[in-house]
Image (cartoon, helix red, strand yellow):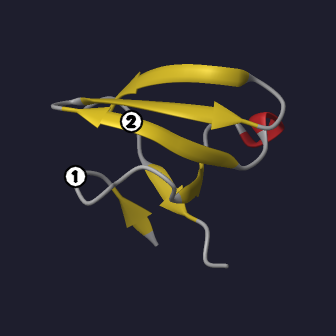
Amino acid sequence: MLVSSDLFPGQRVRLPARPDWGTGQVQSVAGDRVTVNFENAGKVTLRLSAVELELVEE
């Protein structure tokens, strides 16, 4: 499942374009930007208009 504007803090996501980053947890969402704390990449701020995040079902 791919998501964009329905994100909220606490959700688990992954970035299919960067599987090496592992699973991440959404830290904040502000307009077009989302900050995600990834297992293998740390905190990364992404533009939702430029990436597609996949929701990780728990």
Q: In this view, does 8 lie above or below 42?
A: below
Question: Is the Cβ of the residue at disc 2 closer than 8 Å to that at disc 1?
Answer: no
**Label ID, residue 49:** none
Quarter holding residue 33: top left
- The residue that appears at 42% across and 49% down in the rendered structure is 9
Q: Distance between the residues labelled 2 and 1?
A: 12 Å
* Quarter containing the C terminus: bottom right
Residue 28 visible to an observer of this rendering: yes
Q: What residue type is labelled 1?
A: Ser
Location of residue 41 in the rendering, given as x and y in whole percent from the top left corner: 76, 23
The answer to whether 45 appears left or right of 21 in the picture is left
The mark closer to the camera, 2 or 1, is 2
Secondary structure of the residue carrying numbered label 2: strand
The foreground one among 55 and 11 is 11
Crowding near the residue tagged with mark 2, few <14, some 14–19, many ≥20 C-alpha atoms within 10 Å: some
> Tag 1 or tag 2, which sits nearer the N-term?
1
Secondary structure of the residue carrying numbered label 1: loop
**Label ID, residue 28:** 2
Location of residue 4 in the rendering, given as x and y in whole percent from the top left corner: 29, 52
Location of residue 36 in the rendering, given as x and y in whole percent from the top left corner: 54, 34
Location of residue 55 in the rendering, given as x and y in whole percent from the top left corner: 52, 64
Q: In this view, does 55 lie above or below 21?
A: below
The answer to whether 1 appears left or right of 19 in the picture is left
Quarter holding residue 46: top left
Crowding near the residue tagged with mark 1, few <14, some 14–19, many ≥20 C-alpha atoms within 10 Å: few
Q: What residue type is labelled 2?
A: Ser
**Label ID, residue 5:** 1
- The residue that appears at 57% across and 54% down in the rendered structure is 13
Q: In this view, does 22 lie above or below 13?
A: above
The answer to whether 4 appears left or right of 58 in the picture is left
